[in-house]
Amino acid sequence: MNDNKKIYLVPVMLCFFCMGFVDLVGIASNYVKEDLGLTDSVANIFPSLVFFWFLIFSVPTGMLMNRIGRKNTVLLSMVVTVIALAIPLFGNSFGVMLAAFSLLGIGNALMQTSINPLAMLIIGDKNLASTLTFGQFVKAIASFLAPYLAMWGATGVLPSLGYDWRVLFLIYFVTGALSCLLLWATPIKETVSRGKTSSFADCLCLLKNPVVLLSFFGIMCHVGIDVGTNTTAPKLLMERLGMTLNEAAFATSLYFIFRTVGALTGSLLLRIMKTRLFFIVSVVLMALSMAGMFFGTEQWALYVAIALVGYGNSNIFSMLFSEALLSVPDKQNEVSGLMIMGLFGGTVFPLVMGLCSDAAGQAGAVAVMAVGVVYLFSYVPQIKH
């Protein structure tokens, strides 16, 4: 890649940052629950709603890229995301937040599907993996900043704005709008293909392949644990340590800090370790985390458990994704669309976790995530690389 093209990665990396906005749903749903006096099962509708749209939009987004191009698809995703971030600035009623979280999920589904191909268009095949890993690192910065920004607003340091914890949406709205404008102004040349693209039928037929089917469920578990921890970690601290929501919000940041560290170190370790061994180590860390969150009653134990699941879960998606792609090398577009659909696990897990936590406290929610960890252990025999 020549030096002129390197500058084109700047707006793309800003879009990766904006892709991390979706992770605000965990801490935001906790504040909405407190503001509106909701139960866990009702409050968990918000993160579930965000990830529901991956089931609907992932494959159609691939078709859309064939028609309007990768850059325009990312721009569309940014516009939808910016609109979603603007809505809560005008109120925080149940209906308003439902609309905002729905649009945030739609925008993120469009972005997750299109931004990696756009980065590939700029960088080419060489150094692609390291570029995308760095993009995930940039994304994680937005993820772990979200709880701090919400706490900053909730403590009343900006009372004149009148947005309390929702100042988080204002800051990300401004950032998203500027990123959208910068990408729009960046000249990225691409050829728009009109050829045949993936369809739902093409994707569903691939479920006949055992590795693809099991990888799909693995990604559902990975995302379910990710969103579940994001949502449940603060509640654990509030339930067992008597913390306020503002104090407990640090748990979400702790999770994302260790997920970020895991993504960076994992990209290095996977160069010297077999994927299968690293996968086993990652899932063992997650299992230890589940035990810590289920039985832990001390602050240090809960913090260690949250850190372990953050680190352990940080590379699961990439390993599952690569195993699925390598299993059907001549159908990689279709496999990609199907794996992105697996992010729908972020809808299923929080709903079940909300019902279980209402019935049995946060230990019930942890038990649901533990089922996902058990499934990931069962996936190990499928890893051949």
Image (cartoon, grey):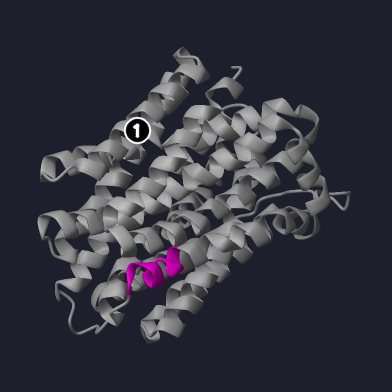
**Location of residue 142 by image quarter:** bottom left
Q: Quadrant of the C terminus?
A: top right
> 212 or 101: which is nearer to us?
212
Q: Position of residue 250 (x, y in %)?
A: 20, 54
Residue 40 colored in magenta in the image: yes
Q: How many marks?
A: 1
> 170 or 204: which is nearer to us?
204
Indicate the amino acid at tag 1.
Ala
Instruction: Say what secondary structure mark 1 lies in.
Output: helix
**Residue drawn at x 49%, y 33% as measured from the top left:** 376
Q: Which residue is mark 1?
A: 287
Q: Position of residue 160 (x, y in %)?
A: 19, 85
**Residue drawn at x 87%, y 53% as measured from the top left:** 194
> 154 or 130: which is nearer to us?
154
Residue 326 colored in magenta in the image: no
Q: Is residue 130 left or right of residue 215?
A: left
- Does residue 266 lie above or below 110 as drawn? above
- Does residue 269 lie above or below 61 as drawn? above
Give the prevailing secondary structure in the magenta stretch. helix
Magenta stretch: give its range: 39-47
Q: Is residue 376 visible?
A: yes
- Does residue 92 lie above or below 366 as drawn? below
Q: Quadrant of the N terminus?
A: top right
Q: Is residue 374 left or right of residue 153?
A: right
Residue at the farthest right position: 195
Q: Is residue 107 visible?
A: no
Q: Position of residue 188 (x, y in %)?
A: 66, 51
**Residue drawn at x 78%, y 53% as measured from the top left:** 200
Q: Position of residue 88 (x, y in %)?
A: 40, 79
> 151 or 120: which is nearer to us?
151
